Amino acid sequence: MTEPIVMYKDVHKSFGDVSVLRGIDLDIKPGEKVAVIGPSGSGKTTIIRMLMTLEEPTSGSIIVDGKNLWQMEKGGQLVPANEKHLREVRGDIGMVFQHFNLFPHMTILENCMTAPVQVKKEDKATAKKHSIEMLEKVGLGDKLDNYPSQLSGGQKQRVAMARALVMRPKIMLFDEVTSALDPELVGEVLEVIRDIAKEGEMAMVLVTHEMDFALDVADRVLFLDNGVIAEQGPPSQVLEHSENERLQSFLHRFR
Ligand code: ADP
């Protein structure tokens, strides 16, 4: 059996007195597409931010590609594991946010080239070639010299995807990437994610409110509620045939 690329083991997270995650156990296989759904404030973003090491768990462990991201200090607090591990893990993970987070003073080609050159130490010509290929793949081959302010929201989000993909991550995280878009721009962004998903080799974690999309793209859907994974399984089972009342009432809002 293949080793999971990501393992959460009894992960808890509190912000001050507020307990947000209360025991998350989750294995993600290489190439697996996992959609995470749940009410606002249920901890969906926190789960993926912890994978990016942007947030540390209060207890439990998270192991990415065999590397434990956190270690217990003498005082009982979890602290980041060694820097080398973290650098390697961050190199394996790409993240696309709700609000594009592009560099406004750089062209879209420069936006894509920065990380390969600075983090992966690729030479500029190679980084440029890969960035152009990736921008062509997301349908923006004719916009290389444009600045983010000259693009629509959907185009900006596609740049953000190209910028993450050019690092060739093993895991891609998508945090409500269509939530800030005008409705008519949602389709073009989901289409690009569908295409990437079809290629197969990358694991993906998608926090989304687009239920039809989850049904179509995900191998597994998780319903997060009250800090635990309250339901999980194949998309049609979770989204169409679950008997969990809280899940049903949550899904009802999207019909
Ligand atoms: P979701 O993505 O499901 O909407 P989040 O993971 O963003 O949920 O947030 C879960 C809960 O944790 C919310 O109540 C939110 O207010 C709280 N929270 C998230 N980040 C922080 C933070 N940095 N400091 C304090 N509270 C936070």
Image (tube, rainbow, N blue to C red):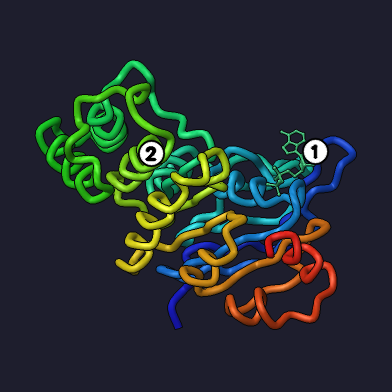
Respond yes or no on whether mark 1 lies under 8 Å from ligand 1.
Answer: yes
* Residue 98 x, y percent position in the rendering: 54, 39
Q: Is residue 252 left or right of residue 149?
A: right
Relative to 216, residue 138 above or below: above
Is residue 23 visible from the viewing direction of this image?
A: no
Near mark 2 (Cα within 10 A), the count class, few <14, some 14-19 or many ≥20, is many
User: Which numbered dot is residue 160?
Assistant: 2
Distance of label 1 from label 2 (alpha carbons) = 29 Å
Of the residues shown, which amino acid type is indicated by label 2? Ala
Q: In percent of the image, x 55 and y 54: which residue is there?
A: 68
Of the residues shown, which amino acid type is indicated by label 1? Phe
Q: Is residue 98 left or right of residue 227?
A: left
Q: In percent of the image, x 23 and y 51: which residue is there?
A: 137
**Where in the image, quadrant-wise, is ligand 1 located?**
top right
Residue 201 quadrant = bottom left
* Residue 225 x, y percent position in the rendering: 79, 60
**In the image, farthest residue toward the right:** 17
Residue 7 quadrant = bottom right
Residue identifier under label 1: 15
* Residue 51 x, y percent position in the rendering: 56, 49
Q: In percent of the image, x 26 and y 36: which residue is there?
A: 116
Nearer to us in this view, 230 or 23: 230
